[in-house]
Image (cartoon, helix red, strand yellow):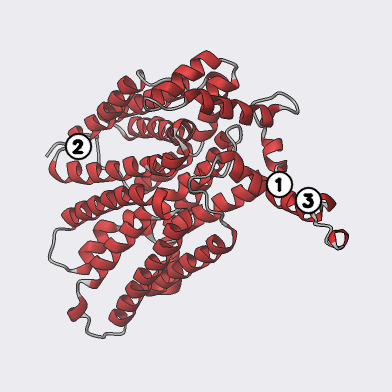
Amino acid sequence: MEQPLDRPLSKGETSWMITLVTLISATGPSLCSLLSHRWGFKPAGYVAGSLVVLGGVIVLLAHSFPVLMLGRVVTCLGTGCTAVVSTTYINGAAEDHVRGALGTFFALMFNAGILIAYLVGATSSYRIVCTGCFVIPLLYLICFFFLPESPQYLLSRGRENKAEKSLRWFRSAGHDVAQELERLRADADARTQDDGRTRMSLAEFLRDRACRLSTITAIVLNLNQSLNGSPVVLSYVVQMFSEAENGVSAGWSAVVVAALQLLATFLSSALVDRAGRRPLLLATNAGMALCLAALGGYFFAKDGHIDVTAVWWLPVAAMSLLLVLNAIGIGALLYVVINESFSPEALPIAVSIGFTAHTFIVTAVIKSYVVLLDWLGLYGCYWFFATCCILSNVYIFFFLPETMNRPIADIISELSGETKKKQKELQSSPYDRVPVAETKT
């Protein structure tokens, strides 16, 4: 059997590698946010892709732990950059009625990567897996060359002719590009009329009411995704399937789950602009809570020495359904909602905060899972995650506005409280009242 490194990694080295590269990836969004603001999304996209390619080559050629660590760090730095480039670039190019479906493609490609990793890892050698880790990003760099710069970025820099060409590239024949360009120009003018700036500083971001409310929502949704049990299931899926004693190879069971998750994300793409964001999030959270409650009940009965052979299928079915519901709901819609809750000049900062928060929260959940296991037991952990899903639904029901098919400017106005102010002004205006007494004869 081929041994790519000079020695096997110890558990401590493996733990350090996972933790360090996760923390490094959290710095990627801030770097890419700075690049995209200064030079545009195209250069930022090239930097992100080049880092992933370079990291993949280093990992492929690594024969020692320090070199392997270096490759992983470079790769994860590029991965963090990708979160900003892909989500904000798509959000700026998409029309309102397909913005949600296109926004789910970040999760779609993420789940596709998981499936490919499971499938290739189960059937091929280490070298082939590492080769794929830089060949696929290399194809991305080649294809990205043919895409235009974001029309909103070009418009913010006063390059209206190039912005029009870019918008025409993204729109179908017969679309009224001039009218949409005029609307985008009016929105940009309205945002910059005070000081003429197209970039929002972190201090301005924190002072803005809409940004503060949306940041709270982003953190709550990140907690929702991290505490619904899916990160733990994904991290320990092979071990869990082995413990389930279902007679099926644990590796191939993981491949099947990853395939289901990918198909579920396709379903989310089809439903998000029809059913809406709120209904999908509420329904899938409720379903995940039921799955987690059932899993907790199964392992509670098993720990109590109750015969559970009649429902041997329950853990596999519940875990699979949990991952599918996560892929349809919060897994696919997290960055869709974040992208629709911030203005274009605030979005890079928001995505950076959201991705960084997500990285630290997921790392903390996975690392603390062993501690929770000792405190609560396996069944208690699942019931804890079920409670988190229910609490997330409470926040979504009361505080998350529906953003489907709405212009970004309209959503920001609602979050800023401008809509309510206008309604109060209209209700209190003496010119809108009918002088009933004066009309009597």
126 vs 268: above or below: above
| Residue at figure coordinates x 57%, y 29% from the top left | 184
Image-based side of 410 in relation to 336, left or right: right
- Label drawn at residue 418: 1
- Label drawn at residue 126: 2
| Residue at figure coordinates x 65%, y 44% from the top left | 413
Q: Secondary structure at mark 1?
A: helix
Residue 76 visible here: yes
Q: Nearer the viewer, residue 396 or 113?
A: 396
Contact? badges 1 and 3 (CB < 8 Å) = no
Residue 189: x and y, percent?
66, 27
Residue 119's quadrant in the figure?
Answer: top left
Residue 152 visible here: no
The C terminus - image quarter: bottom right
Identified by mark 1, the residue type is: Glu
Image-based side of 57 in relation to 195, left or right: left
In the image, which is nearer the foreground, mark 1 or mark 2?
A: 1
Q: Residue furthest front?
A: 441
Residue 38: x and y, percent?
57, 21
Q: Secondary structure at mark 3?
A: helix
In the image, which is nearer the foreground, mark 1 or mark 3?
A: 3
Measured in 3D between alpha carbons, the distance from the residue under mark 1 to the one under mark 2, in whole angstroms, is 56 Å
Identified by mark 2, the residue type is: Tyr
> Which sits earlier in the primary sequence, circle 3 or circle 2?
2
Q: Nearer the viewer, residue 257 or 266?
A: 266
Measured in 3D between alpha carbons, the distance from the residue under mark 1 to the one under mark 3, in whole angstroms, is 10 Å
Q: Nearer the viewer, residue 426 or 114?
A: 426
How many residues crowd mark 1 within 10 Å: few (<14), some (14–19), many (20+)?
few
Identified by mark 3, the residue type is: Glu
- Label drawn at residue 425: 3
Residue 157: x and y, percent?
59, 18
